[in-house]
Amino acid sequence: MTFSLWVLALSFVASPAAITIAPEAAVAGREIYLGNLISAESRGQKGVEELDKIFIAPAPLPGRTRLLKSAEIYAQMAAAGVPTDRFALTVPDQIRVTRRFQSWSPSQIEAKIRQNWLPSLSWKSAELERIFPKMSFCRSEKSECHSATHLAPICVSRFI
């Protein structure tokens, strides 16, 4: 009796987890991981959290879509060293991945401009003076305004 239970338990351990990749997915960040693509029904499978860490591809820009082929999924799994006998993966021929829009407050926009854009200017010194609530550009001898991120125009003073 105990031998049959042991064989039954061994058969459950040896059988791979059935994981289905959804034909459409949405991501929030800059990268697509295999965990982003797993269907809701497959989320409860044992060991699926291991797949969350497998990088698949860069995400599209916010609001845009990227199409992935099943061959890309299998190639990235092989590159990550995931044993094929651990998961019975069902992958559609094509996966449509959309990146969610991002909402930023004015202070978050200002912080991004200060961190990423101002240091990239070729001027010796630049300082953020203000953020305009509407799209507007200004030009004078001492100030130039730009729409740096297409999110918020800024006014930068140049010190030479």
Image (cartoon, rainbow, N blue to C red):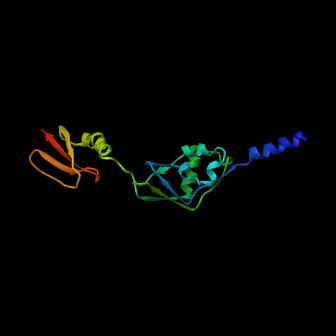
Specify whether residue 81 is in view.
no
Q: Position of residue 46 (x, y in %)?
A: 66, 45
Front residue of this view, candidates 160 and 38 = 38
Task: Name the image quarter holding the N terminus.
Answer: top right
Specify whether residue 138 is in view.
yes
Front residue of this view, candidates 91 and 132 = 132
Front residue of this view, candidates 45 and 116 = 45
Q: Is residue 85 above or below residue 24?
A: above
Q: Position of residue 92 (x, y in %)?
A: 59, 61
Total marks in image: 0
Q: Is residue 29 left or right of residue 155?
A: right
Q: Position of residue 31 (x, y in %)?
A: 46, 48
Judged from this view, the residue extending furthest toward the left is 141
Judged from this view, the residue extending furthest toward the bottom is 93
For the point 25% across and 39% down, the residue is 119
Q: Position of residue 21 (x, y in %)?
A: 59, 56
Q: Is residue 103 left or right of residue 134?
A: right
Q: Quadrant of residue 4?
A: top right
Q: Is residue 146 above or below residue 127?
A: below
Task: Name the image quarter holding the C terminus.
Answer: top left
Q: Is residue 84 left or right of residue 135?
A: right
Front residue of this view, candidates 128 and 50 = 128
For the point 70% across and 49% down, the residue is 16
